[in-house]
Image (tube, coloured by chain):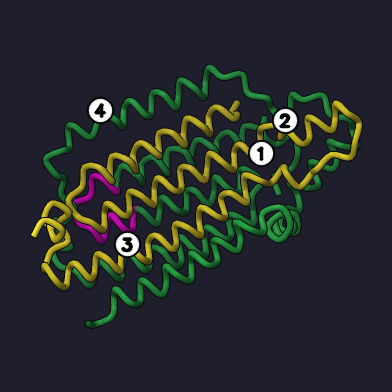
Amino acid sequence: MVGFQHYLALSGILFGLGFYTALSKRNAIVVLMGIEVMFNAVNVAVVAIAKYLLPFSLAGSVASGGEPAYQFLLTGQVFAIFVIAVAAAEVALGLGIVLAIYRARETVDVSQFTLMKE
Amino acid sequence: MIPAGAETSAMFNLAWWLLAIETVFAAILVIRLRDIFKAALALVAFFLGVVGLFVLLNAEFLAAVQLLIYVGAISILLVFTILLTRDVQGGNTSSRFRGLAMVPVLFLVSVVIFVATTTDWPLLQEAALLPPVQEKVAEVFGNSAPWIGGLLVREFVLPFEAVSLLLVAALVGAIALAREP
């Protein structure tokens, strides 16, 4: 039966694949694609945490008998929304930088990006 | 919404395993395909698999957001940039750190899997919740969009505004970088 551990393991494997893409590729656009894979893997993990784990607010209120703070059940999904927004900003800016360097150097090979050394 | 108790059904397990294999396979294709354009299409397949995983996780609103922003916007932006640069066929080459990069990746993945399988997680379904609390929990996950909206404008209003500012700054910066000098 599929449970929380399965989601975390899948998320770890996907993060590893994205990490490998970002570390081992020459093309700057493919490096950005690897970073997107990593963002998505983290999103899967936080949404799985929101679904499967007991939030502190709920556990505390059950013990004390007060009205539980139900909205914190969805904290992980709100985190995922922030991650998606930051990823959108990152990819727009990253591709803008790649295009600017491509215009100056005629290449998108990250090992040729040596503007700071010259 | 996924009905309660469906997580134990064979259909749910089959859907999960199909989506897991599809996402991992698409992520491997992003690494293996030589043509950058085809690698971007594999990335779209990966994003669609994550949409399916969100649906299985009772996060329908996030699935819609993922479909609109990743499959709709970010992949188009990537394809657009790929077509503006050259050496598209055969451009997806590895650097000389290909072997060395395996070391931190394998370390990270093994640590994540070890922690995921050995930690004693405080699971929601194993918690001794009262029946009215359980009903309310099911209602929150069944109708999540208004609750997410409430969280964004109450508890998380400061990060929400900070992200708005970040998006505006990043998009203005992207326009300033990408336009003709």
Q: Are marks 3 and 4 in contact (CB under 8 Å)?
A: no
Q: Tell me which segment is drawn in magenta.
A: B30-42
Q: Earlier in the sequence, mark 3 or mark 1?
A: 1
Q: Are marks 2 and 1 in contact (CB under 8 Å)?
A: yes
**Chain coloured green: which letter?**
B
Q: CA distance from mark 3 to mark 1?
A: 32 Å
Does B88 sit left or right of A6 as displayed? Answer: left
Q: CA distance from mark 4 to mark 2?
A: 35 Å
- Is B110 located above or below residue A94 in the figure? above
* Front position among marks 2 and 3: 3
Give residue B81's position: percent from left, percent from top: 27, 68
Pointer 4: what residue?
Answer: B103
Q: Which mark is residue A51?
A: 1
Q: Which mark is residue A94?
A: 3
**Callout 4 secondary element:** helix
Q: Earlier in the sequence, mark 4 or mark 2?
A: 4
Q: Are marks 2 and 3 in contact (CB under 8 Å)?
A: no
- Is B87 located above or below residue B156 in the figure? below
Pointer 2: what residue?
Answer: B124
The residue at 48%/71% (across/down) is B168
Does B44 sit left or right of B142 as displayed? Answer: left
Amino acid type shown at disc 3: Gly
Q: Quadrant of residue B181?
A: bottom left
The residue at 29%/30% (across/down) is B104
